[in-house]
Image (cartoon, rainbow, N blue to C red):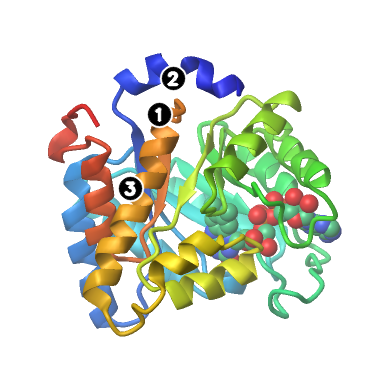
Amino acid sequence: MSDTIHSAHAQAKRPAISFEFFPPKTEEMEQNLWSVINRLAPLSPDFVSVTYGAGGSTRERTHSTIKRILDETRLIPAAHLTCVDATCADVDEVVDRYHDLGVRHIVALRGDPSGGIGTAYRAHPRGYQTSADLVAAIKRRYPDMEVTVSAYPEKHPESPSLAADIDMLKAKVDAGADRAITQFFFDNDLYLRYLDRVRQAGIDIPIVPGILPVQNFKLAKNFAERAGATVPDWLAEKFEGLDDDAETRKLVAATVAAGQVQKLAKQGIGNFHFYTMNRADLVFAISHLLGIRPNGSQKAA
Ligand code: FAD
């Protein structure tokens, strides 16, 4: 595997980590998110990202969460943005507002069909037609904006083949994408094989593995089905019989996810993006096991 060649070098460095949050819906969820952010902030992530609800439903909440992160922390925020049901002018306005606020990183996505996953995607007639168009537009407007895109080690469910999927990634990179974050996966080999194919296709941006610590197995299985991610039998077995035992589930979840990232780190992978689901404990523990200590210090993992 081409990326493993650098393993000795990569292991000497502190892994780069980033955390993903979703914008809170209620006052109580907001308080929870802020206690999570305050717990994870001392780990000095490279950036933290805030998702954009289906069809732009969280447009204002994503914006206010990003603004509060800028106002109250030293974290670097990345704002997710989709093209769904929006004209180019609408999307440009969102980008302008972020830029005015001081945001310099956008996670640019096409988004799910407004009819729901599984229905046909129809781009807005006056909107950006693909995620690559969105990336190009952001970069044209603001060359200083970092743009991250999605990547799918098991291909996107709408994609006819992995090759077609990688062509789409290539189009996003050609449009100026600086980094890709993958859909979550549980089988590291899938990711490592995908990385090889992406490199063979001449794509050289970081392809950061997206890690989902599975606290609630049923929920994760449901997510995985919608996202086209495989849930291996061994993972299901590890959670067998634990439906009513949250305490043990948490220990198992930390062990599984820490094992996954440690194995990737041994393969020379030096970047990890955590889907936190607005919870701190597992991500904090896994980062700790990667050797990451508060305030940027690093212990051998
Ligand atoms: P693209 O990269 O544009 O396309 C994905 C694949 O679908 C392509 O490789 C291509 O093969 C195929 N495809 C696309 N269009 C067509 C077409 N017309 N015909 C045939 N095949 C096609 N969703 C949200 O709503 N909000 C978020 O904040 C959010 N954050 C995400 C963050 C990450 C890291 C990831 C991996 C996903 C995120 N998503 C989010 C989910 C994402 O919006 C969906 O997976 C969506 O269906 C595809 O958007 P995309 O930008 O990944 O698509």
Q: Quadrant of residue 201?
A: top right
Q: In terms of secondary structure, where does tag 1 sit?
A: helix
Kind of residue at badge 1: Lys
Q: Is residue 36 above or below residue 194?
A: below
Note whether ligand 1 is within 8 Å of mark 2. no
Point out the tag, 3 or 1, that comes first from the N-terminus: 3
Residue beneath the point at 19% across and 29% down:
298
Number of callouts: 3
Mark 2 and mark 1: Cα distance apart in space = 7 Å
Q: Is residue 228 above or below residue 211?
A: below
Question: Picture coordinates of residue 36 (x, y %)?
Answer: 22, 62
Q: Which mark is residue 7?
A: 2
Q: Is residue 281 above or below residue 209?
A: below
Q: In terms of secondary structure, where does tag 3 sit?
A: helix
Kind of residue at badge 2: Ser
Q: Quadrant of residue 226?
A: bottom right
- Which residue, given by chain and number where applicable, does mark 1 sit on? 266
Q: Confirm whether residue 227 shows in the render.
A: yes
Mark 3: few/some/many CA within 10 Å (<14, 14-19, 20+): many
Q: In terms of secondary structure, where does tag 2 sit?
A: helix
Question: Picture coordinates of residue 283 (x, y %)?
Answer: 29, 54
| Residue 210 located left or right of residue 101 | right
Residue beneath the point at 71% across and 35% down:
175
Q: Confirm whether residue 128 shows in the render.
A: no
